[in-house]
Image: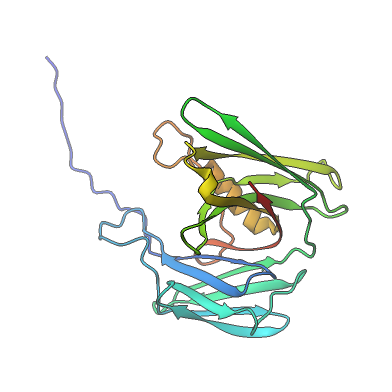
Amino acid sequence: MVLSCSKEANVKLPDSKSLPVLYSYISPTDTMIRLKLLYSLPIYDTHQMDMLAAVSDADVKITSAQGTAQLLFNPTTEYYELNASLYPIIPGQGYKITVVTIKGDVATAETEVPAAIVPINTIAVEAISGDYEISDRIKISFIDEPGIANQYRFGVLYSSVNNSQTDTITTDTYINELYSDVNNDGGNVSLAGLYYQGYYSDTASSAAFYDIFLFNCSPSYFNFHKSISKYAGEDPFSEPALIYTNVEGGFGCFGAYTSSVQRYQK
């Protein structure tokens, strides 16, 4: 005979609240300074809340040695924006973002723009065929900036212009290779990524090319993207992964980079 008893438990859950979540990446070559602002969803909150809903009523400012400027919400893009011609981003300079929400929450973050643009030296593209697919292995090389701790991101955009239309169609290739120059300062670096092309159709009707980017990143930009690359989504067998943030009073990332780009004609 098995006896059992039960007792109703009254457990006080930890206090939690929605906090600002911001994403902003600045670069001297960008024409616009942009910031995306959302609210976090508290762990123990039972209320329905759209985590992807843009927050449109905050006060957003950027500050540096050249003064302070306001970013205004654009309802079309759902970003806070400021034309870079009015507030240029300077290589080697530090910047601070301050967000004050209508609820009174204050979130701040700082970053420094890398001083150098690191050029791409070589590009090699190799087609790799499977039974029903073709992929391109894209490889670049460059010389690391000596005497300075650097972090890099290698990315590619695939584009094509069809003969029947004039618009350029651009699709992210999902190549997102990251590299730190720890133990290889000033050395020659090679990075490679695989882009799945799918089954090729009539390639004679289009002019296809890759825009290949090398980003010299701030530590915040690099660490955030590195943590994202370890996140396995809803896989129940994956290890928990902490997402990097450099935001005080909230979550997210304020980062910076300089970039070099080359176009490779397919």
Which residue is at a point 64% across and 44% down the rendered structure image? Answer: 177
Q: Is residue 57 left or right of residue 50?
A: right
Name the residue nearer the viewer: 184 or 141: 141
Residue 189 percent coordinates (x, y):
79, 42
Name the residue nearer the viewer: 90 or 195: 195
Q: Is residue 163 visible?
A: yes
Q: Is residue 114 left or right of residue 45?
A: right
Q: Is residue 28 left or right of residue 252?
A: right
Q: Is residue 243 visible?
A: no
Q: Is residue 145 above or below residue 235?
A: below
Q: How many marks?
A: 0
Q: Is residue 81 above or below residue 154?
A: below
Q: Is residue 102 left or right of residue 186?
A: left
Q: Is residue 157 above or below residue 195?
A: below
Q: Residue furthest left?
A: 1
Q: Quadrant of residue 38?
A: bottom left
Q: Quadrant of residue 26?
A: bottom right
Which residue is at a point 39% across and 40% down the rendered structure image? Answer: 234
Q: Quadrant of the N terminus?
A: top left
Residue 169 percent coordinates (x, y):
50, 58
Residue 147 percent coordinates (x, y):
88, 53
Which residue is at a point 83% across and 43% down the rendered structure image? Answer: 188
Name the residue nearer the viewer: 231 or 159: 159
Residue 3 percent coordinates (x, y):
14, 22
